[in-house]
Image (spheres, rainbow, N blue to C red):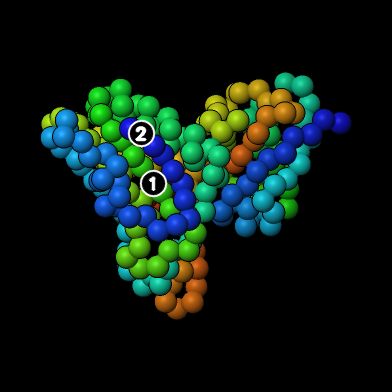
Amino acid sequence: MLTVTVQLFASYADLLGAPTVELPLTPGTTVKDLIQTLRGLPGASLLPPAPRVAVNRSFATADQLIAPSDEIAVIPPVAGG
Amino acid sequence: MRRASILTEEIDPASLINEVSSPQYGAISVFVGTVREVNEGRTVSAIEYSAYKSMASAELERILDEAEVRFAVSALIVEHRIGLLGLGDVSVAIAAAHAHRAPALDCTRYVIEEIKKRVPIWKKEHYADGTREWVDPTRATQASSA
């Protein structure tokens, strides 16, 4: 089965206890689908229903399709400055 | 002259001013953000900044692209520091140069506001009582507007 690596940062990495997770990927998987799968993991139910997601270092929309080679990251509320 | 950097070394705002200076420009606007001692009533002892570095760099570049188009500044530099910062340490510095003051001032304001909205950088506050917490500005907004 195809998988994709999802990077987690800051409070989200703490929630899941890891900086990355591997998730299964079926053709047609969107950002929204991937988040739904992610939220099923232990500790991840505390993630917001629609966190910001970056695909290949740019913010993505919920209906964006995901390919196995994409760089995926779930972005907690940013606090730079 | 234009540059965006995410670094672990100390930021020296004076060096940014030197870098953007030129006799052609009549105005240099500088914004410097520093680590504050008290946040939401809690005494802070240090702040740990972390980043999704590759995207943060890319997002900073996009912000500078936008700022250059909007304000037609002649020189623009932003530096953001990550790692463990102490009270008063400079966390971010922005310098913009233009022939005139208004675009220079508007440009630094634009860049810092956009950084706060969309550059993937996070901070964990270390408090004087030994506890630590991730800062969530969206939660603070909800609390203060309540």
Q: Separation of disc 2 and disc 1 at Cα? A: 11 Å
Question: Most extreme residue toward the bottom, as rendered?
Answer: B129
Q: Is residue B19 left or right of residue A18?
A: left
Chain label for disc 1: B
Select label 2 or label 1 by which is in front.
2
Q: Earlier in the sequence, mark 2 or mark 1?
A: 2
In the depicted view, which residue is nearer to us: B98 or A26? B98
Quadrant containing the N terminus of chain A is top right
Left or right: residue B120 compared with residue A19: left
Disc number placed over residue B79 in the picture, else none: 1
Residue reaching furthest front?
B23
Q: Is residue B130 visible?
A: yes
Residue at image coords 13%, 31%: B100
Point out which mark residue A44 bears.
none
Q: Identify the secondary structure beneath mark 1.
A: strand
**Chain for disc number 2:** B
Crowd band around label 2 with a 10 angstrom C-alpha radius: few (<14), some (14–19), many (20+): some
Coordinates of residue A53 in the picture (x, y in percent): 57, 36
| Mark carried by residue B2 | 2
Tell me what residue is drawn at x 49 percent, y 40 percent.
Answer: B56
Examine the image and state in which quarter residue A7 appears.
Answer: top right
Q: Amino acid at mark 1?
A: Glu
Q: Position of residue B132 (x, y in %)?
A: 50, 68
Are the residues under badges 2 and 1 in a single subunit? Answer: yes
Q: Secondary structure at mark 2?
A: strand
Compared across the picture, whether A60 is left or right of B70 comes to: right
Q: Is residue B32 visible?
A: no
Tell me, yes or no, whether the two marked residues, 2 and 1, touch with CB atoms within 8 Å.
no
Query: Which residue occupies the foreground of this view, B12 or A57?
Result: B12
Foreground: B114 or A51? Answer: B114
Give the residue type that dot 2 points to.
Arg
